Image: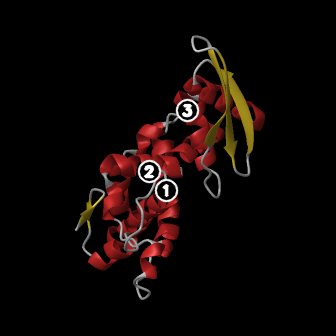
């Protein structure tokens, strides 16, 4: 069976990697993917570190650390999984509602597959999955600086546990031709901030920028 670009020899490893904890509600004897996720998290960190070290010979430790956080964040894993249609392969409890695209369950399963590949075929196998995910394209830390919402998303998804910014319109004022929107962004355990602009989208960007200034 081929999952995320790697053909597994041990099918039971694939099954375990794709089995979410919720699946055990209907199949208590099933083995979920949490142990493999624990292993895959470490292997993913190693692969990202190796790639960054080899491809950024002039970067210092602090810069490499920041880039690695973005490469292996839940947001990056979920983005890759969504692009590859990975979530449809997961084993979940019968009748479960669709998972949000940024669900930690999806990110955990990606890491579990990396861990399973490591056990099945060693470092070379795990690297095949890493390359297939295309995470190296998410290593350009500086490119996020011009997009406050993206930067805030990546920073908060890299925390433990991962957090997701929540945007809420506080009020709408002004006139129909000159509206003024106030939007609040909140991140559990991090803080909140407001932004004001002539459109909801621009107000969200302003709110994200304000919160970034507050936590930097």
Q: Which residue is mark 1?
A: 103
Note whether 208 is above or below 6 in the view shown: above
Instruction: Check residue 186 in the rendering and tell me which mark sits there, or answer none.
Output: none
Q: Quadrant of residue 128?
A: bottom left
Give whichever of 104, 142 is nearer the camera: 104
- For this orientation, the residue located farthest to the top is 177
Within 10 Å of the Cα at label 3, are there few (<14), some (14-19), or many (20+) other Cα atoms?
Answer: few
Give whichever of 193, 124 is nearer the camera: 193
Question: How far apart are labels 2 and 3 at the CA level?
Answer: 35 Å
Q: Is residue 59 visible?
A: no
Q: Position of residue 75 (x, y in %)?
A: 51, 47
Within 10 Å of the Cα at label 2, are there few (<14), some (14-19), or many (20+) other Cα atoms?
Answer: some
Q: Position of residue 100 (x, y in %)?
A: 46, 53
Q: Are marks 1 and 2 in contact (CB under 8 Å)?
A: yes
Describe the element under mark 1 as helix, strand or loop.
loop
Decide if residue 212 is on the left or right side of residue 33: right
Instruction: Check residue 58 in the rendering and tell me which mark sits there, or answer none.
Output: 3
Give whichever of 8, 167 is nearer the camera: 167
* Identity of the residue drawn at 58% across and 33% down: 149
Describe the element under mark 2 as helix, strand or loop.
loop
* Identity of the residue drawn at 41% across and 68% down: 96
Front position among marks 2 and 3: 2
Q: Quadrant of residue 215?
A: top right
Instruction: Check residue 101 in the rendering and tell me which mark sits there, or answer none.
Output: 2
Front position among marks 1 and 3: 1
């Amino acid at each position: 069976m081929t999952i995320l670009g790697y053909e597994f020899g041990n099918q039971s490893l694939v099954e375990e990697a794709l089995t979410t904890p919720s699946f055990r509600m209907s199949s208590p004897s099933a083995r979920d993917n949490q142990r493999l996720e624990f292993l895959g998290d470490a292997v993913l960190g190693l692969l990202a570190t190796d790639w960054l070290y080899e491809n950024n010979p002039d970067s210092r430790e602090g810069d490499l650390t920041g880039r690695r956080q973005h490469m292996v964040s839940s947001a990056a894993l979920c983005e890759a999984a969504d692009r590859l249609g990975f979530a449809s392969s997961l084993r979940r409890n019968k009748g479960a509602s669709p998972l949000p695209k940024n669900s930690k369950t999806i990110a955990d399963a990606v890491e579990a597959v990396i861990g399973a590949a490591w056990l099945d075929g060693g470092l070379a196998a795990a690297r095949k999955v890493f390359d297939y995910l295309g995470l190296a394209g998410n290593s350009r830390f500086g490119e996020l600086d011009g997009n406050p919402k993206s930067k805030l998303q990546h920073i908060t998804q890299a925390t433990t546990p991962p957090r997701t910014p929540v945007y809420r319109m506080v009020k709408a004022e002004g006139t129909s031709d000159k509206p003024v929107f106030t939007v609040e962004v909140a991140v559990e355990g991090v803080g909140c901030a407001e932004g004001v602009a002539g459109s909801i989208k621009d107000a969200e960007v302003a709110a994200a920028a304000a919160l970034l200034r507050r936590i930097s």
